[in-house]
Image (tube, rainbow, N blue to C red):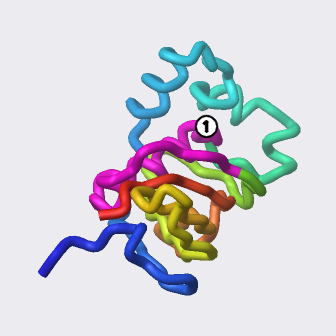
Amino acid sequence: MAELRIQHMKVGDKFVTPAKIVTKTDVETFCTITGMITPTFVSDAFIKSSELHQAMGIKGPLVPGQLQIGIFMGNLVQSRILDDAIIQLGTSNVRYAAPVYAYDMLRTEIEITGNRVAKSGDRVIVDYKWEVKNQDDVTVIQGDNTCMFKNV
């Protein structure tokens, strides 16, 4: 049986990836590479001593939203559903719905909202909404994407 590709899916079709565990090393490496080294992401002591975080119920250092987006895309790439991707055309309506912590398990769920062949005939434009859910089935981040794929 041929592997599933997103450009072959129809409006309303859904796909769920396996989960990825976000490690503390993932967070520290991402923060170091991007320069986003802030106590909110890397300091247990800061979270425990911060009245604002205590009032919001934050349990520990947070996983940056930008890393969450990278994990969502990585989940799809690892699932091989995007193998024929040419380019991502846009992301919109991103909403951070719940906190993410190191050692959370994140899976990506998508639903196709548009699928059309480009005028050239050799490319397919796919619109999909996506959600990232944690091990408790809580949506932590969501949004919409439009991507271009080879028409194979």
Q: Quadrant of residue 46?
A: top right
Inspect the magenta stretch and tell me whether residue 128 lies in it: no
Using the image as rendered, state which of residue 23 and residue 75 is in the foreground: 75
Identify the residue at image location x=62%, y=30%.
41
From the viewer's perspective, tell me whether residue 101 is left or right of residue 51: left
Q: Which residue is mark 1?
A: 66
Relative image position of residue 83 (x, y in whole percent)? 30, 54
- Picture coordinates of residue 71, whole percent (x, y): 46, 47
Residue at the front extreme, as displayed: 120
Q: Which residues are magenta?
A: 62-91
Is residue 130 at all visible to an observer of this figure? no
Q: Point out the residue furthest to the bottom here.
A: 12
Where 80 sits versus 54, above or below? Answer: below
| Above or below for 72 versus 137 | above
- Image quadrant occupied by the N terminus: bottom left
Q: Nearer the viewer, residue 89 or 122?
A: 122
**What residue lies at 47% left-to-right and 68% top-to-bottom?**
135
- Residue 97 picture quarter: bottom right
The quarter of the picture where the C terminus appears is bottom left
Q: Residues within 10 Å of mark 1 (few under 14, many from 20)?
A: few
| Image point (49%, 43%), residue name | 87
Rendered position, 44 above or below 12: above
Going by the numbered disc 1, the residue's amino acid type is Gln
Helix, strand or loop at mark 1: helix
| Residue 148 percent location from the top left of the image | 50, 53
Taking depth in this image into account, of 66 and 150 the one nearest to the observer is: 150
